[in-house]
Image (spheres, rainbow, N blue to C red):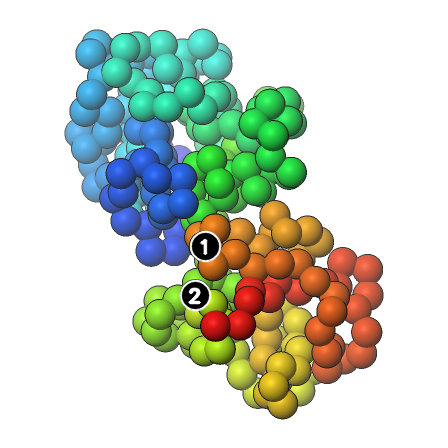
Amino acid sequence: MSVGVLWSVLACGRDDGDGDPTGVTSPDQVGSICEVADDCYPDADAELQGEVLCLDRIPEGYCTHECVDDADCCAVAGECDTDLLQVCSPFESADNKMCFLSCEDEVVEAAGSPDEQSFCHHEVSTSFICRSSGGGSENRKVCVPGDCGVGAACGEDADCAADLECLGGFDGGYCGTRGCGADGDCPGDSRCITIDDENICVKSCASDGDCGLCRGEDVAAACTEDVAFVDGEATEGGAVCVPAAD
């Protein structure tokens, strides 16, 4: 069956990990990397409550299965590897519903996370974000791979998205660009600042939770206004993600 899911979100460097929440893949079977549906749910002891799918619109694939309601997710022994709550939701223009890891308010609060983005970064994977499923009246908040983009940790330029470079001088490296003269010179959702007499583009943020995407806790960045903005002082929502100097 072809899955009519228009999923253009990029997952940055997702590797098949061991379930470490600071890694770059899902710690559960839903959201795991796949090439075909047969790669998914190898530990399930019985037939799942819906057709198994490998969403191939996502780089490296994304395991899930069709469902009717939340009870269909994690209904079979061996289907789930963690206690993370899953929800059944359509995604964008898809007619069918599928299982996703939840980041709805009550789940975030129960985990003691400061916000929904921090929940997905720390409980699921540093490469996952919390976003709306876009399912209309059945819309849910779900953890899915995000676009690492500006602000991601790196060791070399090849670790960063196209048109970005790995900036030195930061703990864990920092994907960004050099030589900006104004915010308009920077990629979307980033601002131009001056550090050590060099102008660079860094990720915009509203809270520390916005700075965790594709950065492990050991190289965390903080959301701060205490920097030299090339275009003047920070405006509302004008803080940026800056990790510690290395």
Q: Residue furthest bottom?
A: 197
Which of the numbered marks, if any, corresponds to residue 3? none
Q: Is residue 90 visible?
A: no
Picture quadrant where residue 114 is located: top right
Residue 68 in the image: x percent, y percent? 45, 13
Tag 2 residue:
172
* Quadrant in which residue 134 is drawn: top right
Q: Which numbered disc covers residue 218?
A: 1
Q: Earlier in the sequence, mark 2 or mark 1?
A: 2
Query: What's the amino acid at mark 1?
Result: Asp
Q: Is residue 191 left or right of residue 85?
A: right
> Split into 4 quadrants, where in the image is the N terminus?
top left
233 or 217, nearer to the observer: 217
- Label count reads 2
Q: Can residue 245 be seen here?
A: yes
Residue 66 found in image quarter: top left
Where disc 1 sits, the SS reads helix
- x and y percentages locating residue 208 in the rendered image: 63, 52
Q: Amino acid at mark 2?
A: Gly
Residue at horizontal 48%, vertical 72%? 246
Query: Is the Cβ of the residue at disc 2 closer than 8 Å to that at disc 1?
Result: yes
Mark 1 crowdedness (10 Å alpha carbons): few <14, some 14-19, many ≥20:
few
Give percent across and percent down for residue 38.
17, 29
